[in-house]
Image: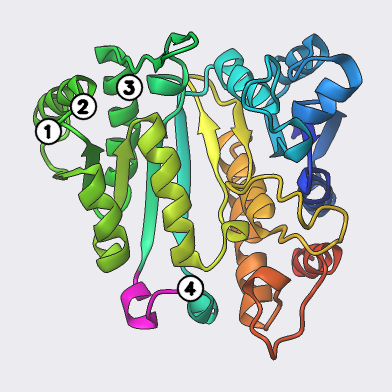
Amino acid sequence: MEAMITVLPGDGIGPEVAAAGRAVLERIAQCYGHHFEFSEQLIGGAAIDAVGEPLPEGTIDSCTASHAVLLGAVGGPKWSDPNASVRPEQGLLGLRSVLGVFANLRPVRIYPELAGASPLRAEILEGVDIIVVRELTGGIYFGEKTRDEFSASDLCKYHRHEIERIVRVAAELAATRRGKLCSVDKANVLETSRLWRDVTDRLMATEFPGIELETLLVDAAAMHLLSRPADFDVMVTENMFGDILTDEASMLAGSLGMLPSASLGETMRGLYEPIHGSAPDIAGQGIANPCGTIASVAMLLRHSLGLAEEADAVEAAIASVIAEGGRTADIATANEQKLTTSEMTNAVIARLG
């Protein structure tokens, strides 16, 4: 097949891991007879430095014309002033809105060989296979914001249709897995969460009666993610809760560097990125873990290009490298050899044929 893919390297380690993802895509194209055309564009701090805004029109045009978008990371101390009128994160939030990607899928799978990299005991991690479905374009991140000398506010607002569509995505996923859905809210305090719970309960009862529904308050969910993570199958929650819980869940896998994500909307075009940030403290050292980005490439192949066999091959290649002892610094023990970003990438590519 032929496909257009926009690559947004971004900031910090973003260019390093984005290059790894692109290299894997190029190898897949070579092995399976596809033609992928790449368009590299600016976003975040790099875009601010170059043109004064975090999401230039050229980037928007390229992304909306592409089959999929692969993102590295945005942000860093150079642009970290929270009072600045222009910030890198505005580029990412704006891109999500432009693309209409409202459903963020974050799989959390445990490689048995990396159980020792997690701060949790190995027996707690047995059988962990979770997908967190985070609502991505509503809630407090996108609500009206005010500030004066003495106070500030961020409006958290959800419409019924926003809740219905994200819960449907999560329930349909659960139907293909173990048939369990956990909805996370804060209905004992927040009116938006009370609406979330009412809509979810009604929708699940009428459209998905065969799915086992569990409802947890977000603080309880945070606790249970560490005490009984193997009990969860698919979790669905609102924007801010999902952001926090998935970073917590990354510790089950041992490192933020291992976890991918896909942001999807009504069309097949999606935005794919590792869940980690720009990690400016290690940028340019060639030691960033590319596995989260490469696993995001697998999700890109599966969800936007419909190439399930190729996606499976990428995921199997990552698992093979890990099983054979391939480790970057973030997942290596003191006695294990540490691979550079390019060495880990090349090891995965070598297993693709």
The answer to whether 30 is drawn above or below residue 35 in the figure is: below
Whether residue 133 is in magenta: the answer is: no
Front residue of 279 and 252: 279
- Picture quarter with the C terminus: bottom right
Q: CA distance from mark 1 to mark 3?
A: 23 Å
Numbered disc in front, either 3 or 4: 4
Front residue of 211 and 141: 141
Upstream in sequence: badge 3 or badge 4: 4
Do residues under tags 1 and 3 come within 8 Å of each other at their CB atoms? Answer: no
Q: Which disc is residue 193 wearing?
A: 2
Upstream in sequence: badge 1 or badge 3: 3
Q: How is the image coloured?
A: rainbow
Q: CA distance from mark 2 to mark 4?
A: 31 Å
Looking at the rendered structure, the kind of residue marked 1 is Asn
Secondary structure under badge 2? helix
Question: From the viewer's perspective, is 272 left or right of 225?
Answer: right
Q: CA distance from mark 3 to mark 4?
A: 34 Å
Do residues under tags 2 and 4 come within 8 Å of each other at their CB atoms? Answer: no
Numbered disc in front, either 1 or 3: 1
Upstream in sequence: badge 2 or badge 4: 4
Numbered disc in front, either 2 or 1: 1
Whether residue 121 is in magenta: the answer is: yes
Q: Which residues are magenta?
A: 119-127
Residue sitting at x 75%, y 66%: 348
Looking at the rendered structure, the kind of residue marked 2 is Ser
Looking at the rendered structure, the kind of residue marked 3 is Arg
Residue underneath mark 1 = 188
Residue 314 appears anywhere in the view: yes
Q: CA distance from mark 2 to mark 3?
A: 16 Å
Looking at the rendered structure, the kind of residue marked 4 is Ser
Residue sitting at x 16%, y 43%: 211
